[in-house]
Image (spheres, rainbow, N blue to C red):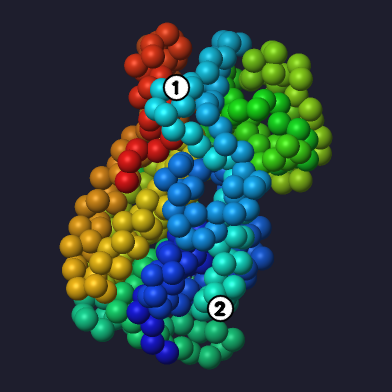
Amino acid sequence: MRTQVCIIGGGPSGLLLSQLLHRAGIDTVVLERQSRDYVLSRIRAGVLEWGTVELLREAGVGARMDREGFVHTGTYLAARNRGFRIDFNELTGKKVMVYGQTEVTRDLYDARAAAEGTVIHGAEGVALHGLDTSSPYVTFTKDGTEHRIDCDFVAGCDGFHGPSRKAIPASVLREYERVYPFGWLGVLSETPPVSHELIYANHERGFALCSMRNANLSRYYVQCPLTDKVESWTDANFWDELKRRIPEEAAATLVTGPSIEKSIAPLRSFVAEPMRWGRLFLVGDAAHIVPPTGAKGLNLAASDVYYLYHGLVQNYQGDNEGIETYSQKALARVWKSERFSWSLTTMMHRFPDQSEFEQRMQEAELDYHESSEAAKKVLAENYVGLPY
Ligand code: APR
Ligand code: PHB
């Protein structure tokens, strides 16, 4: 089999890149280890930067998002039982779209199927070869049969645990990581959201977040110790803890209900450099991870896709400037989003070994954001998404 771009990974990165390249007349094959249903069973964040919204529309997958998504012009931060609003529109002239990543992925799968795109599920033992030559190829097994795909380029969209990053020689690859000493316990419930906008709450018992998917599907999180097991959290315990951590006014109106999904996720900041080696390009979680506090995971994947898509189109038109500068351009934006996600995580969470001085610094940071338009503007421009 031969294709122009072999894409490893059928998550948001791989599917969006495949769909955009298809619309530019560039042939791709997507290799995904899991089934479509398994990929769509993953519950992930739900805030899209406007750059991501526009890229999804450019890919021809914006219709349901525009119908069912919620445009948000601000968010609330809360501490010491008091909330204050960050008005994105007033401060930056921009907004965000609340629309679940699962729905983005579903729309992308549907678009690839409608275009008869080649997405191979159940691809096992994917291995990358000849990346430092002009004839790279990928091998994999499906239903016990070995396959080989010859290609011009390989896009490693295979997430944090995939093979692509590991195909870069250890002598070349540099990795940077911070693991946070806590996790997020998340609950999805078929209940009306407690607020029309998100509430990020700093509390002495730990962080909490109130989010949503639609008018009758809410997403809530509480910070929890890394040693916690999800089965030790009853729904009742979760709701009680959430009510303790959000402002009383919100707690009083919170509609609780049975969890339809409940899970604990660890938090880490991670970046791998470079994001290109020979004919391999790393995209999305394969190259970087952010703590979910700033809702940057999917949005960073989108900006990587934007740079690579344009670089590959340019390359097939005879100009390789875009692919030559891909890693440098993508990393410049990645590191700024890593900074924002780390900074918001540090401001909003309780760290087990936090000193009294650090506690005072956190309180001062929150007071500064509540009282300074300049501080609000910095947070807003990072939250809605820095320019590509
Ligand atoms: N072979 C084939 N596919 C693989 C392999 C492999 N060896 N290893 C991983 N994959 C697939 C996974 O099954 C997954 O569907 O690659 C895909 C990677 O998707 P994601 O992990 O979702 O990463 P990405 O597409 O970059 O999207 C980033 O998704 O995980 C969230 O928080 C993250 O919002 C961010 C977004
Ligand atoms: C979510 O809705 O799952 C969500 C929203 C904002 C975040 C993280 C998660 O910062």
Amino acid type at mark 1: Glu
Where is residue 63 shown, x and y percent of the image?
A: 59, 54
Residue 165 visible in the displayed image: no
Q: Which residue is mark 2?
A: 116
Cα separation between marks 1 and 2: 43 Å
Who's the residue at 39% across and 75% down the image? 25
Disc 1 vs disc 2: which is toward the camera?
A: 1
Quadrant for the N terminus in the image: bottom left
Residue at position x 79%, y 27% in the image:
255
SS class, disc 2: loop
Mark 1 residue's CB less than 8 Å from ligand 2: no
Please rate how many residues cluster around mark 1, counting C-alpha atoms within 10 Å: few if below 14, some from 14 to 19, many from 20.
few
Q: Please, what is the three-letter code of the amino acid marked with disc 2?
A: Glu
| Circles 1 and 2 in contact, beta carbons < 8 Å | no
Which residue is at 48% across, 21% downward? 86
Vertical position of residue 136 compared to residue 380: above or below: below
The picture quadrant where one finds residue 239 is: top right
Which element is circle 1 on? helix
Query: As displayed, is residue 108 above or below residue 338?
Result: below
Residue 262's place in the image compared with 8, above or below, is above
Q: Residues within 10 Å of mark 2 (few under 14, many from 20)?
A: few
Mark 1 or mark 2, earlier in chain = 1
Q: Residue 126 occupies which quadrant of the picture? A: bottom left
- The residue located at (27%, 63%) in the rendering is 311
Task: Identify whether 335 is placed above or below 305.
Answer: above
Label placed on residue 90? 1
User: In the drawing, does residue 1 fall left or right of residue 132?
Assistant: right
- Residue 292 placed where, x, y %? 50, 39
